[in-house]
Image: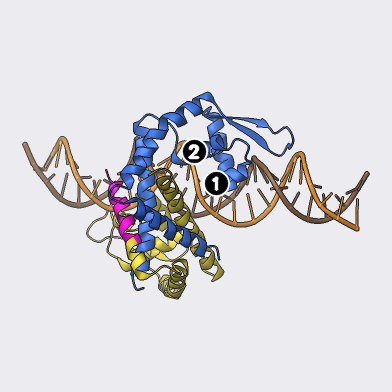
Chain colours: A yellow, B blue, C brown, D orange
DNA sequence: TGGATTTAATTGATATATCAATTATAATTG
DNA sequence: CAATTATAATTGATATATCAATTAAATCCA
């Protein structure tokens, strides 16, 4: 497969970095004070308020340690509140604040626009293909 | 494009993270004491010994600041030597040491095997498609 | 020539990734 | 029940990403 596979992983790296920077720029431009990663974790918590931080970490493809630190920041920024879990004192109940809910909602259209713009000129079928191959790569790297 | 585009960017994120972890594991397993990023910078320097750090940064999709710090580490680990450029005293001449050249060479087959394994079951044509779309995404995110 | 601008690299601050070690609690099991 | 094991989360150390500010040298140009 000569140089093609070399190039592919470079493109993969560059594509996700480009999208992240693009999304972050648009987030800031619209006055939101969250990083992409903070947003990702906040969204995961909001969608799954009963999950442990470890489950959140898996969903957001993050390290447990990173989630601990990001949650800390989100609490400090008043996007999350943290209370001890009633049944299991090792865990926490994380709840998005009203501010968080409002911001997530306000960001939704921006996120959708970002994605649409990033995928401009790529058909639905092609996106489906793309996703299939990415999933295959993920599988292959488990070994 | 409903949820498909959502999923795609998650897959993209996960794919590159999976590959990085996979490659890093195999690197360590074979006794090399470099991170993927250090390897990337070292390789870029070796292939282009006359480039500025900024050019290296672009080639490796890295921030200038990151390259400065990675080069520091590579010098400390005795993979690079640094001398002031004869014509331009703002610049440095970076040269890979013998150890670096030997290690890069020794890692080459491992890197190739990593890539082959990660792309297992994906044809050459499909890889070319994949790359085309990734390049399109990179373009789209420039705006 | 000399002041303004550009370029190459560094530095500082903050956020995130990763690995290992640790703490606290819960669950298991002999 | 007590000892062991498993789980949830944190903490520390180091590496990298990002942005802004800074330093030093080169270039431009009136």
Find residue A69 and report its horizontal and vertical position in percent: 42, 53
Q: Residue at x 40, y 70 (%)?
A: A97
Q: Could you tell me if residue A46 is visible in this image?
A: no
Q: Label 1 belongs to which residue?
A: B59
Count of number-bearing discs: 2
Q: Label 2 belongs to which residue?
A: B38
Chain at numbered mark 2:
B
Q: Does dot 1 land on a helix, a strand or a loop?
A: helix
Q: Residue at x 35, y 40 (%)?
A: B114
Disc 1 versus disc 2: distance between alpha carbons? 13 Å
Q: Nearer the viewer, mark 1 or mark 2?
A: 1
| Magenta segment | A130-143
Chain at numbered mark 1:
B
Q: Nearer the viewer, residue A76 or A50?
A: A50
- Label 1 CA crowd tier, 10 Å (few <14, some 14–19, many 20+): some
**Quadrant, the N terminus of chain A:** top left
Q: Residue at x 39, y 38 (%)?
A: B111
Q: Is residue B105 above or below residue A26?
A: above
């Amino acid at each position: 497969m000569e140089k093609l596979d070399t190039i592919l992983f470079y493109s993969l790296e560059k594509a996700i970095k480009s999208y992240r920077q693009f999304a972050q720029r648009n987030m800031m431009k619209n006055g939101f004070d969250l990083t992409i990663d903070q947003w990702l974790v906040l969204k995961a918590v909001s969608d799954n308020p009963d999950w442990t931080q470890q489950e959140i970490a898996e969903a957001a493809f993050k390290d447990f340690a990173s989630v601990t630190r990001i949650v800390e920041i989100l609490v400090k920024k008043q996007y999350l509140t943290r209370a001890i879990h009633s049944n299991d004192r090792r865990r926490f109940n994380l709840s998005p604040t009203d501010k968080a809910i409002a911001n997530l909602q306000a960001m939704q259209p921006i996120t959708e626009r970002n994605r649409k713009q990033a995928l401009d000129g790529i058909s639905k079928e092609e996106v489906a293909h793309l996703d299939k191959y990415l999933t295959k790569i993920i599988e292959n790297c488990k070994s």
